[in-house]
Image: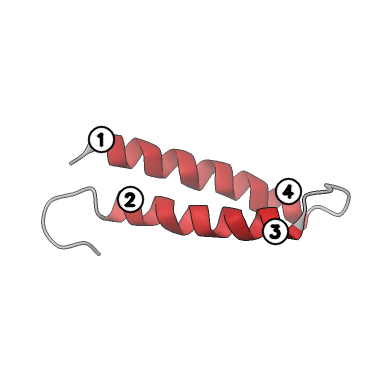
């Protein structure tokens, strides 16, 4: 397992989750475009974690 990919993917997922949850807050002031970027970053983080192991990616 590639620990660099897992670590980078976990960081992307964590930061993106925080941004998306902040977007749902009524008085957060987080713009919608930032939420879109966070969603793409979350997908990239999931891809990094999913392809970090040996064998087929799930």
User: Tag 1 or tag 4, which sits nearer the N-term?
Assistant: 1
Please tell me which of labels 3 and 4 falls first in the chain: 4
Question: Residue at the spot x=50%, y=52% of the render?
Answer: 41
Left or right of 44 on screen, residue 32:
right
Is disc 2 in contact with disc 3, using a CB cutoff of under 8 Å? no
Separation of residues labelled 3 and 4 (CA atoms):
13 Å
- Dot 4 lies on which element? helix
Residue drawn at x 48%, y 44% is 12
Q: Which residue is mark 3?
A: 33
Q: Are dots 2 and 4 in contact, CB under 8 Å? A: no
Residue 40: image x %, image y %?
A: 52, 59
Q: Name the quadrant of the C terminus.
A: bottom left
Q: Which mark is residue 22?
A: 4
Please give the label number shown on residue 3.
Answer: 1
Residue 47 as seen in the image, left or right of residue 51? right
Label 4 – label 1 distance at C-alpha: 28 Å
Question: Between marks 2 and 3, how big is the CA–CA gap?
Answer: 23 Å
């Amino acid at each position: 397992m590639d620990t660099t990919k897992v670590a980078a993917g976990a960081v992307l997922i964590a930061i993106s989750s925080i941004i998306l949850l902040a977007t749902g807050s009524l008085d957060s002031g987080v713009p919608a475009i930032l939420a879109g970027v966070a969603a793409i970053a979350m997908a990239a983080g999931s891809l990094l974690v999913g392809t970090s192991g040996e064998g087929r990616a799930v």
